[in-house]
Image: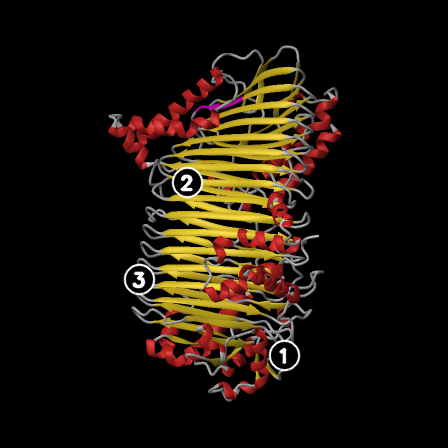
């Protein structure tokens, strides 16, 4: 392990932060939280800031992308631009600036707490859950986000709810790193539509390091729509840990559209019979790296997972898709499928895929498929022969390529809003092509 | 009715077999001292009567090896190997004089070959196979030499090639698998005892299938073959490699290196059936097989095709690969890997697309039974200059029983927009419907499984030369014996 930690750059940024500020972090003095933070920083220390020598980070060199020391953000008093990226304004929303809660607006049915204000009066459901997921050594950045957590939000759901989490990253005068957490607990039989958006302004390099815990109790439903479109210089790592109890259902649509480096690192555990997970991912990028790395952990019999990842890559962008489906011993009748597709639109674009299967039970149906290539020349010719200009024809084909990922998610307003954002990204892609 | 009789015969064959090559031949051995140091390497080199440059090459490899660490990324687990507790050289004593014909060969050796079923004497016309049999580390008999010489094909033990064709060996040895390639290949470079050298001249289609049977015999003897096949412009050669080993409890290390070079428009077909001792039902004993195989499609329009049936060895660590350097070159990998009991296999391929219009195809079938672990690990990479590269990969895994594991770890990297890469993989168990269908027609459970598995493997079995295909089909059945309750 020591060989893995050799080239961390800058050396020990997170460990230094912990050494200096552990005593002043939110909730410091709460024995349970202090203990979890200590375990987490040790877990992070096993790899340090990952380089390509760490197998799970083979295609995404975070350590190398950092330009220098980043200062932790613990206060932010500046203006926050609240853009409603998902069309019609949802009733309940939480706005965060650099991972720190700026304002909370919720009605009944949702319990929401600011993780920047944890104290001994914090409710038991936070104490029971916070830091139990997305903080192990397998997810080093998630561990760091817990150890160094400056803020974030905890949500407990009863009944059927919709919530919008808006992450805004206004310009700062210095290189900055924000460490924050989100905890969502969906109680038995409850359901939540979670809209999550990340946007940012141009400026000095910053790393948004977010750890997300999703706890779905029996029969709970969570629909998770996430849109990340940030400045071309920004770094985003979101570590998600999810646990699904009996007959719980998780459906997610993620879209990554811009950042110098973005990574979603998800570990989803199908912990009990009948749990189902569907994860769709769209990446449209003109440069930089968009990485989605998942582990679907079939830990119980009769569990189902579906993954569909589609990437459109122009410029010198690089799409990374890594998915591991693990079926544990005894998890019979596990049913899993993953499909990764990438379109490469420029000579410098790159797509890397690693769809892994790790099966320890015999009565299972698991499969994966991967396809990487350019736009179909015949289809393009067909459209051009009917008088459709090249750029328009390409746009049509790309939209058609992405369309199936969005089917069935959220409502029309959200889908339209997403489609509009995709069109914007595609427009800039096409421009760089011609 | 013929079909019925054939089936009955096959069943009888299977029933009587298990590991039919598990016997030990008692022959006086000449050994190097146990362990590895520069003196042992000098001893091996001297035994072979090698020129100075070859010795230097070995020593350089040894010095590099000392600085390397054993790789641990594969999904295989085994007790730490004590490299100082292995004999690195063993030669049958009676070989000293160098047999000129079959009469000169130790009759005990001939007996061994007969048990193995090697077509060395009367069978040679029937099978049409030229055999360069390696008994432990030294080649003892070579047949069909005259016919091959007529065609200009060089087919001889590596030690002979070093002596007789030093320019060819120097030109190609280590150019596909460099001395420092990996831990096991470097070890091989230092201590390789023998192996096969093949050179097919320009425009020659090798008149027969070339074949070498490797056989590990002396207890505690690692076997380190080195094979180099060069197909010059416009030539074609098909090479068969088959392996058996006597049954015994001591783990035996095997670290071979195979290098293939295909020049412009040349084609090499390399087929392997590997059924070395896999250890017993409790995972005791068996061969450790750490092999580096790589082909270089160096010329335009060249083609290299790997076909392997891996049923033996306690541990298999093997990734026959193709470097598609020449424009329009083609690489193929067809594989069946069967693991039963406590066997572990981590095998797959690398297709490295460097040239324009290069094509590759991967078909991998993994079958896991008992408490075995079977991993496919593969890389397909398309470099920016490899315009219009094309790859299709299919890897399927079959699980028999709830205690085994099947894993797929493909790496797919594309850096050229005109390249097309497709990959598909499935994992499942034997279909209950298929099994029921067979059972209903009176086919016993075990045989039905063998039948279904053979069907599952058909795409790969079809790629084998005829002589191998028959043996391989039987092996599929034998390997899975006892896996169905």
Measured from the top left, where is residue B48 in percent x and y?
49, 81
Q: Is residue A423 left or right of residue A196?
A: left
The residue sitting at the front extreme is B1
Residue shown at the point (67%, 24%) measured from the top left: A219
**First in sequence: mark 1 or mark 3?**
1
- Tell me the CA gap for discs 1 and 3: 44 Å
- Please, which chain is the residue tagged with disc 2 on? A
Residue A155's quadrant in the figure? top right
Q: Secondary structure at mark 3?
A: loop
The relative height of residue A161 versus residue B379 in the rendered view (above or below) is above
From the viewer's side, name the closer residue of A124 and A360: A360
Residue A127 visible within the image: yes
Residue that carries the numbered disc 3 in the rendered image: B264
Colour style of the rendered protein structure: secondary structure
| Mark 3 surroundings within 10 Å by alpha-carbon count, few (fewer than 14), some (14 through 19), many (20 or more) | many
Task: Tell me the magenta residue range.
Answer: A196-201
Q: Is residue B282 left or right of residue B379?
A: right
- Please, which chain is the residue tagged with disc 1 on? B
Mark number, residue A372: 2
Mark number, residue B25: 1
* Contact between labelled residues 1 and 2, with CB atoms less than 8 Å apart: no
Residue A136's quadrant in the figure? top right
- Tell me the CA gap for discs 2 and 1: 53 Å
| Mark 1 surroundings within 10 Å by alpha-carbon count, few (fewer than 14), some (14 through 19), many (20 or more) | few
Q: Secondary structure at mark 2?
A: strand
Kindly indicate whether the residues beneath marks 3 and 2 are on one polypeptide chain: no
- Tell me the CA gap for discs 3 and 2: 29 Å
Residue B308 is covered by the magenta coloring: no
Q: Is residue B251 left or right of residue B175?
A: right
Residue B70 visible within the image: no
């Amino acid at each position: 392990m020591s060989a893995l930690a050799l080239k961390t750059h800058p050396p020990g940024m997170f460990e230094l932060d912990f050494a200096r500020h552990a005593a002043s972090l939110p909730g410091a003095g709460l024995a349970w939280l202090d203990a979890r933070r200590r375990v987490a920083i040790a877990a992070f220390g096993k790899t340090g800031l990952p380089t390509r020598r760490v197998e799970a980070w083979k295609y995404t060199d975070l350590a190398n992308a950092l330009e220098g020391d980043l200062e932790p953000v613990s206060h932010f008093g500046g203006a926050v631009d609240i853009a409603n990226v998902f069309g019609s304004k949802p009733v309940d929303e939480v706005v965060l600036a650099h991972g720190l809660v700026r304002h909370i607006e919720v009605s009944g049915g949702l319990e929401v707490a600011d993780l920047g204000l944890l104290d001994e009066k914090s409710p038991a459901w936070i104490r029971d859950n916070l830091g139990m997921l997305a903080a192990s050594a397998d997810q080093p950045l998630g561990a760091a986000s817990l150890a160094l957590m400056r803020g974030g939000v905890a949500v407990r759901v009863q009944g059927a709810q919709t919530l919008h989490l808006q992450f805004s990253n206004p310009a700062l005068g210095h290189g900055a790193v924000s460490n924050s957490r989100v905890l969502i607990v969906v109680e038995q039989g409850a359901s939540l539509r979670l809209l999550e958006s990340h946007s940012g302004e141009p400026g000095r390099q910053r790393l948004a390091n977010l750890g997300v815990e999703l706890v779905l109790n029996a029969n709970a439903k969570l629909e998770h729509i996430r849109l990340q479109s940030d400045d071309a210089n920004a770094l985003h790592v979101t570590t998600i840990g999810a646990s699904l109890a009996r007959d719980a259902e998780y459906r997610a649509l993620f879209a990554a559209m811009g950042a110098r480096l973005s990574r979603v690192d998800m570990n989803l555990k199908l912990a009990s019979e009948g749990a189902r997970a569907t994860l769709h991912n769209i990446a449209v990028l003109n440069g930089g790296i968009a990485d989605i790395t998942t582990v679907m952990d079939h830990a119980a019999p009769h569990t189902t997972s579906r993954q569909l990842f589609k990437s459109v890559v122009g410029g010198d962008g690089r799409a990374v898709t890594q998915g591991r489906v693990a079926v544990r011993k005894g998890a019979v009748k596990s049913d899993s499928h993953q499909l990764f597709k990438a379109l490469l639109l420029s000579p410098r674009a790159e797509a890397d895929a690693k769809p892994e299967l790790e099966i320890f039970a015999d009565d299972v149906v698991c499969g994966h498929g991967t396809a990487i290539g350019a736009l179909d020349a015949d289809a393009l010719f067909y459209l051009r022969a009917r008088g459709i200009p090249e750029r328009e024809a390409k746009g049509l084909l790309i939209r058609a390529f992405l369309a199936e990922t969005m089917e069935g998610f959220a409502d029309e307003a959200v889908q339209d809003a997403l489609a509009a954002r995709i069109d914007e990204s595609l427009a800039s892609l096409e421009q760089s092509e011609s | 009715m013929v079909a019925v009789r054939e089936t009955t015969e096959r069943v009888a064959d299977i029933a009587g077999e298990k590991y039919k090559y598990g016997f030990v031949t008692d022959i006086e051995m000449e050994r190097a001292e146990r362990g590895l140091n520069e003196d042992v390497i000098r001893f091996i080199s001297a035994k072979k009567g090698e020129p100075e440059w070859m010795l230097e090459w070995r020593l350089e490899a040894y010095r590099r090896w000392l600085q390397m660490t054993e790789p641990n990324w594969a999904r295989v687990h085994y007790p730490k190997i004590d490299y100082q507790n292995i004999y690195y050289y063993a030669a049958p004593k009676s070989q000293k004089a160098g047999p000129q014909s079959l009469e000169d060969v130790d009759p005990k050796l001939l007996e061994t070959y007969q048990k193995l079923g090697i077509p060395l004497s009367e069978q040679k016309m029937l099978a049409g196979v030229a055999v360069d049999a390696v008994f432990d580390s030294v080649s003892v008999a070579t047949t069909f030499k005259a016919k091959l010489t007529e065609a200009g094909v060089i087919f001889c033990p590596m030690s002979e090639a070093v002596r007789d064709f030093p320019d060819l060996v120097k030109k190609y040895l280590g150019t596909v698998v460099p001395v420092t390639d990996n831990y096991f290949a470097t070890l091989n470079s230092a201590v390789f005892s023998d192996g096969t050298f093949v050179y097919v001249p320009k425009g020659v289609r090798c008149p027969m299938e070339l074949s070498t049977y490797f056989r590990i015999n002396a207890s505690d003897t690692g076997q380190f073959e080195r094979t180099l096949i060069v197909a010059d412009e416009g030539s074609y050669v098909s090479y068969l490699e088959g392996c058996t080993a006597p049954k015994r409890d001591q783990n035996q290390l095997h670290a071979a290196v195979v290098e293939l070079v295909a020049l412009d428009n040349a084609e090499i077909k390399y087929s392997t059936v590997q059924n070395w001792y896999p250890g017993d039902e409790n995972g005791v004993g068996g061969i450790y097989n750490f092999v580096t195989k790589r082909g270089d499609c160096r010329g335009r329009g060249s083609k290299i095709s790997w076909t392997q049936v891996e049923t033996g060895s306690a541990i298999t660590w093997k990734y026959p690969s193709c470097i598609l350097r020449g424009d329009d070159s083609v690489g193929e990998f067809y594989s069946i890997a069967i693991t039963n009991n406590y066997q572990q296999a981590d095998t797959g391929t690398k297709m490295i697309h460097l040239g324009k219009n290069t094509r590759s195809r991967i078909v991998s079938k993994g079958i896991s039974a008992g408490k075995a672990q079977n991993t496919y690990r593969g890389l397909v990479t398309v470099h920016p200059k490899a315009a219009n590269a094309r790859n299709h990969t299919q890897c399927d895994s079959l699980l028999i029983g709830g205690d085994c594991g099947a894993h797929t770890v493909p790496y797919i990297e594309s850096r050229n927009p005109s390249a097309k890469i497709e990959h598909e993989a499935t994992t499942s168990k034997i279909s209950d419907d298929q099994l029921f269908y067979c059972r209903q027609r009176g086919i016993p459970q075990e045989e039905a499984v063998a039948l279904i598995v053979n069907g599952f493997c058909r795409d790969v079995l079809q790629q084998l030369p005829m002589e191998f295909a028959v043996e391989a089909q039987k092996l599929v059945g034998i390997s899975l014996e006892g896996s169905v309750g």
